[in-house]
Image (cartoon, helix red, strand yellow):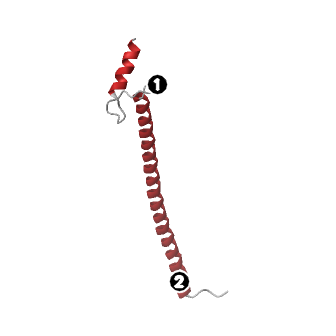
Amino acid sequence: MAPASPLVNVSRYAALALGLTYGFVHRRSLEKSEGQKRIEREYQRKEDLIEQAKAAYAKKKLSEVVAPSGGIITAPEHPDFDLEKVVEQFEKSEN
């Protein structure tokens, strides 16, 4: 087998170097985009946890506002608050 010409050898090594450089650059871009996606997923997970906590807190506060006996709302800041019903409930409980 005849030895390869210098032009063929230079072309081979240039292609090899170009391939290695492309692979390195492409891998770094993929790692960077994956890192960004991971950060976004973590942020979304935290937002979801915050929303769940807010919903649980609102549910808890609503259950505290509505009295279990008779369903009378005792919190004055609640839109359905009725002072007369609260007074009636307290009068009934005192008797």
Q: Residues within 10 Å of mark 2 (few under 14, many from 20)?
A: few
User: Is 25 above or below relative to 2?
Assistant: above
Nearer to us of marks 2 and 1 is: 1
Rendering quarter of residue 62: top left
Q: Which amino acid does label 1 sit on?
A: Pro
Q: Where is residue 36 in the image (x, y as percent from the top left)?
A: 44, 58
- Give the crowd class for mark 1: few <14, some 14-19, many >=20 residues within 10 Å: few
Q: Which amino acid does label 2 sit on?
A: Ser
Residue 19 x, y percent position in the rendering: 52, 74
Measuring 55% from the left and 83% from the top, which residue is drawn there? Answer: 9
Asked which secondary structure carries label 1, the reply is loop
Q: Looking at the image, which residue is at 61% across and 86% down?
A: 3
Q: Nearer the viewer, residue 88 or 24?
A: 88
Task: Provide the residue designation for mark 1.
Answer: 68
Disc 2 to disc 1, C-alpha distance: 85 Å
Q: Mark 2 points at which residue?
A: 11
Mark positioned earlier in the residue sequence (2 or 1)? 2
The x and y percentages for residue 81 are: 35, 31
Pointer 2 with pointer 1, Cβ within 8 A: no
